[in-house]
């Protein structure tokens, strides 16, 4: 079974992101970039399926400019067999990413496609669902466990107040939640080996896709500064302030 995993290049989750002074976006100058954490979980799950003898090949695909090859190489060091970059100017909006992934699916015909549930930069939570709609493939979102059984995939999903298990016909799409697994670290020998693995580059035209934008970012601004708190001297004073100043109790 061929498994395709979508990995996105994002700002490392430890970095405190700043908005650009002109409000046109986040300032990415000299900022550490990494694989989106949910995509790391997706790669880990695909590699575990390969180690269990269920998957035969794991392909990592990233859409963006040349710099996203760094994240594809990381995915290869974590155990993916080969990589695909679809060359675009920066990372496009979710609908364009979904259309390009659909093009890669048409070329590669994977049985399973794993994406993160969300990218931590845009917080979109859209690409997997849009890909499901565009390809007409069944999808299991927010997966905390997956099990391949013959030509079916059982996906346990994290929903409000519990877990739901659904059965999907393969080929299918899964988006990963945080508790699906704990990703491994890449070892130095595997980082070296990853440099030699195959990485193909496609243009959107190779996939028959015109990457036209539907969204424009109007403004990006930092959150309002938090006001300093005060220390009250007694419960009575607290109640008085809540009642008469904050007016949150009566
Ligand atoms: P989003 O819909 O932007 O929150 O992203 C959800 C998931 O879609 C990510 O975790 C990735 O698996 C995939 N994805 C989004 N953008 C890209 C991209 N530029 N390249 C590869 N995968 C992507």
Image (tube, rainbow, N blue to C red):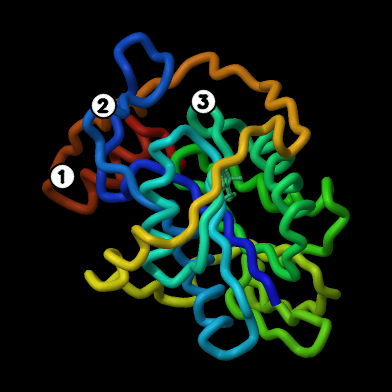
Circle on res. 75: none
Ligand 1 neighbours mark 1 (CB distance < 8 Å): no
Cα distance in 3D space between marks 1 and 3: 54 Å
Cα distance in 3D space between marks 1 and 2: 43 Å
Please state if 93 lies on the left or on the right of 133 as rendered.
left
Q: Earlier in the sequence, mark 1 or mark 3?
A: 3
Using a 10 Å C-alpha cutoff, classify the residue at mark 3 as few (fewer than 14 neighbours), some (14 to 19) or many (20 or more).
Answer: few
Residue located beneath label 2 in the image: 29
Residue located beneath label 1 in the image: 232
Using a 10 Å C-alpha cutoff, classify the residue at mark 1 as few (fewer than 14 neighbours), some (14 to 19) or many (20 or more).
Answer: few
| Closer to the eye: label 2 or 3 | 3
Q: Position of residue 53 (x, y in %)?
A: 60, 89
Please state if 162 lies on the left or on the right of 194 as rendered.
right
Question: What secondary structure is marked by label 3?
Answer: loop
**At 11% from the left edge and 47% from the top edge, which residue is drawn?**
233
Please indicate, yes or no, whether residue 146 appears anywhere in the rendered image. Answer: yes
Question: What secondary structure is marked by label 2?
Answer: loop
Q: Position of residue 128 (x, y in %)?
A: 68, 52
Q: In what quadrant of the picture does the N terminus appear?
A: bottom right
- Quadrant of the rendered structure where residue 121 is? top left
Question: What secondary structure is marked by label 1?
Answer: loop
Cα distance in 3D space between marks 2 and 3: 16 Å
**At 44% from the left edge and 72% from the top edge, which residue is drawn?**
79
Q: Position of residue 246 (x, y in %)?
A: 36, 33
Q: Position of residue 61 (x, y in %)?
A: 56, 52
Q: Earlier in the sequence, mark 1 or mark 2?
A: 2
């Amino acid at each position: 079974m061929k498994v395709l995993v979508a990995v996105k290049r994002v700002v490392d989750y430890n970095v405190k992101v700043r908005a650009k002074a002109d409000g046109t976006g986040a300032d990415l100058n000299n900022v550490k970039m990494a694989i989106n954490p949910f995509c790391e979980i997706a790669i880990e799950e695909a590699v575990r399926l390969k180690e269990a003898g269920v998957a035969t090949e794991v392909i990592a695909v990233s859409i963006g400019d040349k710099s996203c090859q760094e994240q594809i190489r990381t995915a290869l060091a974590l155990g993916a067999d080969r990589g695909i970059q679809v060359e675009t100017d920066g990372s496009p909006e979710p609908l364009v990413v979904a259309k390009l992934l659909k093009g890669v699916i048409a070329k590669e015909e994977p049985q399973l496609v794993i994406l993160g549930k969300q990218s931590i930069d845009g917080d979109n939570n859209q690409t997997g669902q849009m890909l499901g709609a565009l390809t007409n493939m069944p999808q299991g979102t927010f997966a905390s466990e997956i099990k391949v059984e013959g030509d079916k995939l059982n996906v346990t999903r994290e929903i409000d107040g519990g877990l739901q298990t659904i059965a999907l016909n393969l080929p299918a799409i899964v988006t990963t939640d945080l508790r699906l697994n704990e990703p491994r670290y890449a070892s130095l020998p595997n980082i070296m080996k990853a440099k030699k693995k195959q990485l193909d580059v496609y243009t959107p035209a190779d996939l028959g896709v015109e990457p036209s934008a539907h969204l424009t970012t109007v403004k990006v601004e930092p959150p309002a500064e938090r006001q300093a708190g005060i220390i009250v001297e007694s419960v009575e004073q607290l109640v008085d302030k809540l009642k008469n100043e904050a007016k949150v109790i009566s």
